[in-house]
Amino acid sequence: MNLIKKAVLTMTLSSTLIFSGCGYNTLQAKDEAVIASWSEVQNQYQRRTDLVPNLVNVVKGYAKHEQTVLTEVTEARANVAGIKVDKEVLEDPELFQKYQQAQAQMSGALSRLLAVSENYPDLKANEQFRDLQIQLEGTENRIGVARTRYISTVQDYNTYVRQFPQVMTAKVIGMKAKPNFQAESGADKAPTVQFE
C-alpha cells in the first residue's frame, strides 16, 4: 500500500513538473488574453453598429436624394451583423479576413455618409447629428485602441506559441498562431486631396 502511494505521489510530482515546464498554463493564459482582447474589439464594433441606424435616420431627413450612400451604410451594417463572430474566427485566417473586410466596408460607408453631411449646412448644425457624429468619432478611436491592444496580445501569444518548448506543447494540444489585423489594400498610398 505504501508503495502505491509513493508511485502515485511520484507520478503526480513528475507530471506537475513536466506540465509546468512545458508552458501549458501560460499557453492557456495567453489564449484567454487573446480572446478577451478580441471581445473588446467586437464590443467597439458593436457600439459602432448600434449608432448607425440613428445616424442614418437623422441624415435621411436632410439628404433625401442621397439614397445611394444611405443604402451603402445600411447594407454594410447588415453585412457586419450577418457574420457570426465566435472563437472560430480567431482560429481561421480566412474567416478573420472576411470579418475584417466587412468592418472595412462599414468604415468606408460611414466615411461617405459623413462626407455627404458636408453638403447640408442644416444637417451639420443639427444637435442630434453632431452628438451622433461625436459618438461615432469616439467609437472609431476606441476601435483603433482595441485593435492595437489585440494586435499586441496576438503578437505576444504568437511569439510564445512558436518558442521551444512551448511549440511542442502547442502542437500536442492543437494550439497554433492566430491571425492578426492587416491594413486594407491601398492603405499604403496617400489619399489624393483635390480642392475645387
Image: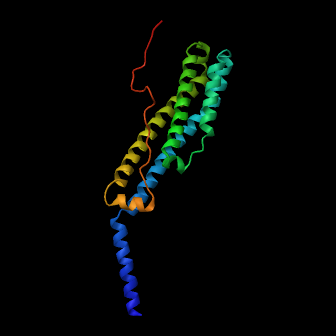
Q: Which residue is drawn at 39% across and 92% down?
A: 2
* Position in image of residue 107 (x %, y %): 53, 29
Percent x, y of residue 133: 55, 26
Position above or below: 39 against 72:
below
Direction left: furthest residue: 164
Residue 60 coordinates in the image, percent (x, y): 67, 21
Image height of 182 relative to 177, above or below? above
Q: Horizontal placement of 139 versus 176: left or right?
A: right
- Is residue 1 shown above or below 40? below
Q: Residue at x 60, y 13 (%)?
A: 120
Instruction: Tell me the quadrant of the picture where the N terminus can be found.
Output: bottom left
Front residue (pair 135, 99): 99
The one nearer the camera, 158 or 41, is 158
Q: What colouring method underlies this structural image?
A: rainbow
Query: In the shown orientation, is residue 38 left or right of residue 27?
Result: right
Left or right of 12? Residue 72 is right
Q: Using the rendered view, name the quadrant where residue 78 is placed.
A: top right
Up/down of 28 relative to 149, above or below: below
Instruction: Identify the residue at the far bottom of this view.
Output: 1
Q: Position of residue 157 (x, y in %)?
A: 39, 51
Q: Which residue is drawn at 45% across and 35% down?
A: 144
Between residue 48 and residue 69, name the one nearer to us: 69
Residue 3, quarter of the rendered image? bottom left
In front of the other: 59 or 125: 59
Say which residue appears at 62% left-offset and 38% top-offset.
81
Q: In which quarter of the image is residue 83?
A: top right
Extreme residue toward the top, this view: 196
Q: How many marks?
A: 0
